[in-house]
Image (cartoon, rainbow, N blue to C red):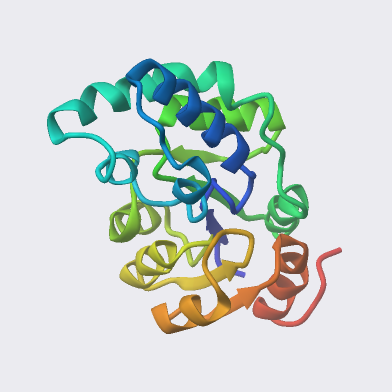
Amino acid sequence: MPDLVVGFDLDLTLIDTAPGFQDVLRALGAELDVDFPVEEMTRRLGPPLDMLLEPYLDAERIPAAGDRFRALYPDHAITSVPVLPGAHDALAAVRRRGGRTVVVTGKFPENARLHLDHTGLDVDVLEGWVWGVGKAAVLRREGASIYVGDHVHDVEGALAAEVTSVSVLTGGCTAEELRDAGTHVVLESLHEFPAWLDEHLGGVSAP
């Protein structure tokens, strides 16, 4: 079997960052005297923070607000964020096949690492601050053949890298939206990933 490398998105694919993200936005809003619509802003996490803030802040305020968001993040959004069901098993399924796992996320790398350390998600490579088609360069560099995400922009990254796009419905995108974006596979959650991987790699279950 050729070397297996599987990429995974982080937010709303491996971990449920929405509640923690909301808490950081509330803290940031209190400092800036801005009433952010936090539930609306976190319904479909994936785009970079600057894009989420654009509708609510003047352009010149966004860089400093982003820096402050990232500074507030460790105290508000690490210990409260759970692993999504099936995440550990999905990573373990790749390892049982002798494969490597790569997390490719738009999140600030240092904060992404805090999540991995806190949750015990064991991955080989973490690449942060990459989004959409920008993820393709990392996937190609690492030799990935599969990328798993929850957002249409994760699909864009997988297709740009010419790898198999696997989408889970744990984010805000619907199955129809993900299929329209071109994903190859839609799973309800990562619970279904190990069985799908076995079938994808030849239908023989891992020992």
The percent coordinates of residue 201 (x first, y second) are 66, 76
- Within the image, what quadrant is residue 31 found in? top left
Camera-nearest residue between 170 and 100: 170
How many dots with numbers?
0
Figure quadrant of the N terminus: bottom right
The residue that appears at 70% across and 64% down in the rendered structure is 189
Figure quadrant of the C terminus: bottom right
Camera-nearest residue between 190 and 32: 32
The residue that appears at 52% across and 53% down in the rendered structure is 43
The residue that appears at 46% across and 30% down in the rendered structure is 25
Camera-nearest residue between 88 and 43: 43
Q: Is residue 198 above or below residue 94?
A: below
The residue that appears at 59% across and 54% down in the rendered structure is 13
The percent coordinates of residue 186 (x first, y second) are 60, 76
Position of 207 compared to 66: left or right?
Answer: right
The percent coordinates of residue 19 (x first, y second) are 62, 38
The percent coordinates of residue 106 (x first, y second) are 39, 44
Q: Is residue 9 above or below residue 150?
A: above
Question: Which residue sits furthest right?
Answer: 207
- Within the image, what quadrant is residue 160 found in? bottom left
Q: Is residue 25 above or below residue 147?
A: above
